């Protein structure tokens, strides 16, 4: 009976991990689109480009909030199987006010830099969650 309960807990952790992974990947996709608009802006965009970029950043923020919620649930499920995820997903503000009101190469570069840092954090989070899911599946199948 203990083995069955453990397998059930592992299955729940895998499902929670897959939900978190999907949220992280969606946030990464949106952030990639924002990065593309940011590059256009860096090389002479304008107000329309700023609006599109920040629209994508707003979408990214929505997905990041969902990912944080899913990661919290994943951590809770991992505790049930005595596993832990050491992941801090804190994506900073993207300097929207500065970028729109002082639209110049410096502010565009600052936003581009923040997006790049956020993308690196997201990529690392995806990698960690994928590894944890893989470990859970190996544990389940052993």
Image (tube, rainbow, N blue to C red):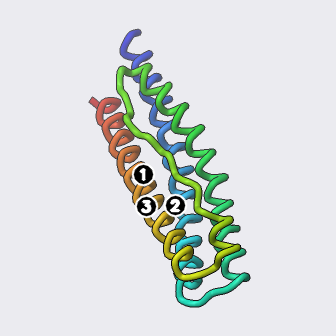
* Foreground of the two, 132 or 71: 71
Which of the labelled discs sits on residue 117, or is there none? 3
Seen at 72% across and 82% down, the residue is 47
Q: Secondary structure at mark 1?
A: helix
Seen at 67% across and 60% down, the residue is 59
Q: Is residue 139 above or below residue 1?
A: below
Label tally: 3
Q: Answer with mark 3 or mark 2, whichever residue precedes in sequence.
A: 2
Separation of residues labelled 1 and 3 (CA atoms): 14 Å
Q: Is residue 45 above or below residue 38?
A: below
Which of the labelled discs sits on residue 126, or is there none? 1
Q: Secondary structure at mark 2?
A: helix
Q: Are marks 2 and 1 in contact (CB under 8 Å)?
A: yes
Kindly indicate the quadrant of the structure image that contains residue 53. Answer: bottom right
Which residue is farthest top?
1
Nearest to viewer (mark 1 / mark 3): 3
| Image x and y of residue 122, in percent | 45, 55
Seen at 45% across and 66% down, the residue is 116
Residue holding disc 2: 28
| Image x and y of residue 83, in percent | 35, 26
Kindly indicate the quadrant of the structure image that contains residue 26. Answer: bottom right
């Amino acid at each position: 009976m203990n083995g069955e309960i453990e397998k059930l807990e592992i299955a729940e952790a895998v499902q929670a991990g897959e939900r978190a992974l999907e949220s992280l990947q969606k946030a990464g996709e949106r952030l990639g689109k924002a990065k593309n608009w940011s590059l256009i802006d860096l090389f002479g965009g304008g107000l329309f480009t700023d609006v599109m970029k920040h629209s994508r950043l707003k979408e990214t923020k929505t997905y990041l909030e969902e990912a944080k919620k899913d990661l919290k649930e994943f951590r809770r499920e991992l505790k049930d199987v005595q596993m832990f995820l050491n992941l801090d997903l804190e994506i900073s503000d993207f300097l929207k006010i500065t970028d729109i009101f002082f639209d110049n190469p410096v502010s565009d570069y600052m936003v581009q830099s923040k997006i790049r840092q956020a993308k690196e954090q997201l990529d690392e989070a995806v990698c960690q969650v994928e590894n944890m899911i893989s470990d859970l599946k190996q544990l389940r199948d052993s």
